[in-house]
Image (spheres, rainbow, N blue to C red):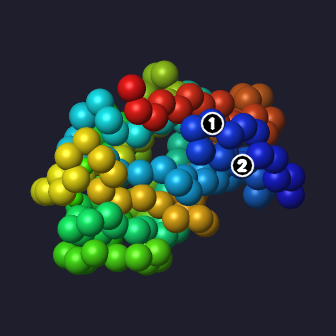
Amino acid sequence: MKLAALTALAGLTLCVSTPQTQAQTAITLDVSGMASWDFQGDPDNETFTVFLGVMAPIIEFSWNLNITTVGASWADELTLGLLGNSVIINPALGDSFTVVNQNYQGSIDPQLLVIGADGILDFEFYETGFDDNADAIDAYFEAGSTITIVLMPAPGSLAAMGFAGLFAARRRR
Ligand SMILES: [Ca+2]
Ligand SMILES: [Ca+2]
């Protein structure tokens, strides 16, 4: 297996391992240091996009996140919005309390994630329910926090050649 750190932008590191099998490519996004700031759509929020390629069915989407909350903010308020927030994940669902470096692992049905014609999967981190710290971080990801995407890239695509996930990150305005 080849493991290559392609780029590091705004605290994000992206590794592509290929091939898992002939047909699969695994992309690991290291989101350590990224944070959830305010409510959905707030210009303070941290967002990024991953280019997966057109016609690239996702066969696994999972996370392994170490979350620390700030001030009075609760763990279950931290939210991952995908595909224009049409798919929403609360990794610490039910944990209505503060946490320090608490580990959360999980996955969703990959069929929920249908990549559009632009080949892009977009992310926004934000708070649901209570923005406890106005214009400031409510929760952040500690070291070792990753999101893993396994997909079946189209033959001959960049992803199939191990160059999946050319991405652009945008942190604060
Ligand atoms: Ca905030
Ligand atoms: Ca909060």
CA gap between label 1 and label 2 equals 12 Å
Q: Quadrant of residue 108?
A: bottom left
Whether residue 60 appears in this view of the structure is no
Quarter of the image with the N terminus in it: bottom right
Residue in the picture at 48% in, 30% down = 170
Q: Residues within 10 Å of mark 1 (few under 14, many from 20)?
A: some
Q: Is residue 169 left or right of residue 96?
A: right
Percent coordinates x, y for residue 80 in the rendering: 35, 51
**Residue 7 x, y percent position in the rendering:** 72, 37
Mark 1 sits on what residue?
Answer: 9
Q: In the rendered image of this protein, does residue 147 appear above or below residue 81?
A: below
Of badges 1 and 2, the one in the foreground is 1
Depth check: give the residue in front, 109 or 127: 127
Q: Which three-letter amino acid code belongs to the residue tagged 2?
A: Cys
Is the CB of mark 2 within 8 Å of ligand 1?
no
Q: Which amino acid, by three-letter code, is at mark 1? A: Leu
Report the front residue among 74 and 156.
74
Tag on residue 15?
2
Task: Check residue 75 in the rendering and tell me which mark sits there, or answer none.
Answer: none
Residue 111, image x and y in percent?
A: 41, 51
